[in-house]
Image: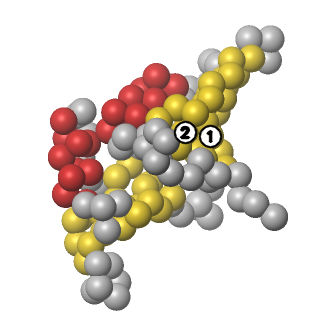
Amino acid sequence: MQYLHTMIRVTDLEKSLHFYTQGLGFRVVKRNDFPEEKFTLVFLSASPEGGGDDSALLELTHNWGVTEYVRGDGYGHMAYRVESVEKVRERLKAHGYDLSWGPGLTPSKKGAMAFVDDPDGYEIELLE
């Protein structure tokens, strides 16, 4: 068995793409528009071009005309290992975003961590 991707629904695709690509440095791997069904799928990788594993992607699903989703209280967050929380924070700030929590210490007190919320309020944990 191989893990492939996590899908989240987004209300404003361009705003979400700006956040993930410019703010966090993800790259678009594939984009498919389905005009007859009125939705778009965009697959993103957290790995740099040619420098990582694209086996676990983030899929943004944009259902055209939908302006709001209700997330269940069972959803927690996505987590990504980063080289430097502070460098990610600087990149986020340069593109109009900031951390929603932190930086601080992990519960074990052995590393740094922070959280940032995407434009739809999905929490992303950054672990150094």
Residue 7 falls in which quadrant of the image? top right
Q: Could you tell whether 78 is left or right of 94 in the image?
A: right
Residue position for label 1:
59
Mark 2: amino acid: Leu
The residue positioned 64% from the left and 52% from the top of the image is: 55
Give the crowd class for mark 1: few <14, some 14-19, many >=20 residues within 10 Å.
many
Give the crowd class for mark 2: few <14, some 14-19, many >=20 residues within 10 Å.
many
Please identify the residue farthest to the front as the structure is shown.
Answer: 50
**Residue 80 in sight in this render:** yes
Quarter of the picture containing the C terminus is: bottom left
Q: Is tag 2's residue or tag 1's residue first in the polypeptide sequence?
A: 2
Please identify the residue farthest to the top as the structure is shown.
Answer: 35
Disc number for residue 44: 2
Mark 2 near mark 1, Cβ–Cβ under 8 Å?
yes
Quarter of the picture containing the N terminus is: bottom right
The residue positioned 34% from the left and 33% from the top of the image is: 22
Residue 112 falls in which quadrant of the image? bottom left
Task: State the image coordinates of residue 35 (x, y, percent, origin top left).
Answer: 74, 11
Q: Which of the two marks, 2 or 1, is nearer to us in this view?
A: 2
The residue positioned 29% from the left and 78% from the top of the image is: 111
User: Against 72, is 120 above or below?
Assistant: above
User: Against 8, is 31 above or below?
Assistant: above
**Residue 46 in sight in this render:** no
Task: State the image coordinates of residue 82 (x, y, percent, origin top left).
Answer: 35, 60
Mark 1: amino acid: Glu
